[in-house]
């Protein structure tokens, strides 16, 4: 907590706001493309009206946004401690609980090179690899292609 003093005024407490709070919590997902393949897409956590600039931390984020993150960790980092934590704590259940916090923190510290705070935000999103899916335009079938770090 920070106390501000002004001439002639009593001290008033002001809580320091984390930088990620300006984005708001992720409350949906979006399908994004990398511009290279028309029928390929990535499913990424997002915030209505704010695009991909959103955050998730312990017990925040909509179920579908958290599930998209968890599925990306399981698919693209499947042999790591992070994926094991997701599997051990309920799998892709859409809940940003302790297992997901620990998984994100481990990825940040060991694979992504960003601040290891366990909070998903724009820096983590940009550093992560995401599953690339292909939708067959003839019948709508969906196929996993590979994991990439797309430019979005």
Image: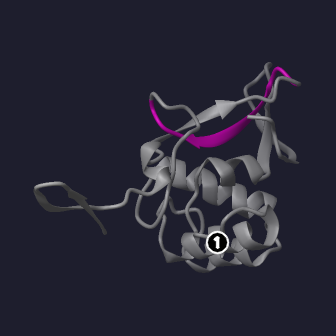
Q: In this rendering, is residue 78 above or below 48?
A: below
Q: Tell me the quarter of the picture where residue 67 sits.
A: bottom right
Q: Which residue is mark 1?
A: 105
- Which image quarter is the N terminus in? bottom left
| Residue 61 horizontal side relative to residue 30, left or right | left
Q: Is residue 145 a member of the stretch shown in magenta?
A: no
| Residue 101 horizontal side relative to residue 85, left or right | left
Q: Which residue is at the front of the view, 67 or 58?
A: 58
Q: Tell me the quarter of the picture where residue 145 sits.
A: top right
At 49% from the left and 52% from the top, the residue drawn is 19
Q: Position of residue 106 (x, y in %)?
A: 70, 74
Q: Please state the extent of the stretch shown in magenta in the rendering.
A: 37-48
Q: Tell me the quarter of the picture where residue 76 sits.
A: bottom right
Label 1 sits on a secondary structure element that is helix
Q: In this rendering, is residue 54 above or below 12?
A: above
Q: Position of residue 114 (x, y in %)?
A: 72, 62
């Amino acid at each position: 907590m920070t106390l501000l003093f002004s001439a002639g005024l009593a001290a008033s407490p002001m809580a320091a706001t984390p930088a990620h709070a300006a984005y708001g919590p992720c409350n949906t997902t979006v399908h994004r493309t990398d511009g290279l393949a028309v029928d390929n897409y990535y499913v990424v956590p997002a915030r209505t009206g704010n695009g991909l600039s959103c955050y998730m931390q312990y017990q925040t984020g909509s179920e579908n946004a958290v599930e998209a993150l968890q599925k990306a960790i399981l698919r693209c980092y499947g042999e790591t401690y992070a994926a094991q934590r997701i599997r051990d704590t309920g799998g892709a259940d859409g809940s940003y609980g302790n297992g997901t916090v620990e998984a994100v923190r481990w990825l940040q510290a060991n694979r992504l090179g960003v601040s290891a705070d366990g909070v998903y935000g724009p820096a983590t999103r940009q550093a992560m690899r995401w599953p690339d899916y292909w939708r067959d335009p003839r019948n709508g079938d969906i196929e996993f292609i590979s994991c990439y770090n797309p430019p979005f």
